[in-house]
Image (cartoon, grey):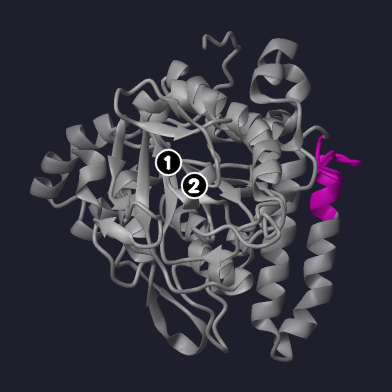
Amino acid sequence: MKLTHARIERGVVSRRSFLRGVSAGAIASGSLGFTDLMSLYADDLRRQGKSLILLWMDGGPSQLETFDPKLGHENGGGTAVIDTAVPGIQIAAGWEQTAAMMDDIALIRSMTNREGNHQRATYQLHTGYIPAGGVKHPSFGCCVAERIGDAELDLPSVVSVGRTIGAGFLGVNYEPFVVDNPNQMPANITATMGADRLQQRLALFNQLEQGFADRGAVAAVRNQRELYAKASSLVFSERTRAFDLSEESAEIRAQYGENNFGQGCLLARRLVEVGVTFVEVRMNGWDTHNENNTRTTELAAQVDPGFATLVTDLKERGMLENTVVLWLGEFGRTPKVNARAGRDHYPRVFNAAIAGGGVRGGQVIGSSTADGAEVAERPVGVTDLFASLCHALEVDPTHENIATLGRPLKIVDGGTVVQELFS
């Protein structure tokens, strides 16, 4: 699949060469202290341009009708299988374009968890934590943006095509910017006045708020000011054109798929290209308690071209090495088909697909039993997956953010890197 395109420049410059040249001499002369140097390295990390795109399959996709079919077993539900670009790896029919890109995609067929409730599992698969009273955890993507996002970027560092888990105690600076329809420019991102006049209004507004802050609402006022500052920066940014899919050719838009998910994938590519750190694209409808085969076939027809073309496009642009693409839902579906020709919730074993970020494609990690009821080899838990994403993005999973009431919480609490992904 060959794509033709016009590149959007990120406008992000690395300072590694500068650091290499000055660090040793500056430390030796005493002009640059250790703390200063670490600050420079931290800033350099933020400018490496690494990004994460989450393709979220809301509702829990059936592993047996996606990437772990059971041909010849009664639990297979009659799902046909197809060969992929990698000899020996087969996936379910309906994913032909993804199959063609299997050289760049790693499958995990041994994801396992305990949460079988949609809300709780969605929360956990986004944050790494189970819901806990009194603590609103930030999503993993927001945590990543806080660590490696470019603080000077005038676009939001976190964008979601569809509603998602928010920034929690990280605050408004990392709250997702939600795009309801990728085919339309987001509302209210065009300035209706000049920059000078807007700054005058903001200054007056800050004065009016100060009295409220002095009466004990410092945190609320600070969040409000940060939100207004981000909004004013956004409306005057030339990079907002990244949201305008009309700049893309009809050919490319058709290759991604002329539906919200496919166009969301195209938008995700455009956003990471200009420096956005985390983009989530959601595909609803995977809660297939009824007519599983029919509904999954319809969903796959929308997701398959978007997923495959995104990986292709990133690769051709030289962006796949620094961009992780994760296909995932909150759990899988039961091996046995129910009386309504559907499959029910099943967190015990499900699958995920990963490309980019140094992940070695063309391989399968773990396996399920012949009947699909259990993990047979190499179980991978939620924290293992998140630790692996941190490894790909060069983020320290043990970094602690300070939560409500001063409680420190790690980005990933436990888990080990799935080294096979990178070997």
Type of amino acid at the residue the image marks with label 2: Gly
In the current view of this chain or complex, which residue is farthest to the left? 28
Picture coordinates of residue 352, whole percent (x, y): 44, 48
Residue at left 36%, top 47%? 108
Residue 10 visible here: no
Query: Could you tell me how many numbered marks the image carries?
Result: 2
Examine the structure image and report whether residue 186 is included in the region drawn in magenta. yes
Which one is in front, 369 or 354? 369
Q: Check disc 1: other Cα within 10 Å, few if <14, some if 14-19, many if 20+.
A: few
Q: Which mark is residue 72?
A: 1
Q: Which residue is mark 2?
A: 76
Q: Quadrant of residue 384?
A: bottom left
Which one is in front, 374 or 13? 374
- Looking at the image, residue 278 sits to the left or right of residue 371; the answer is right
Which one is in front, 142 or 346? 346
What span is colored magenta in the figure? 185-200
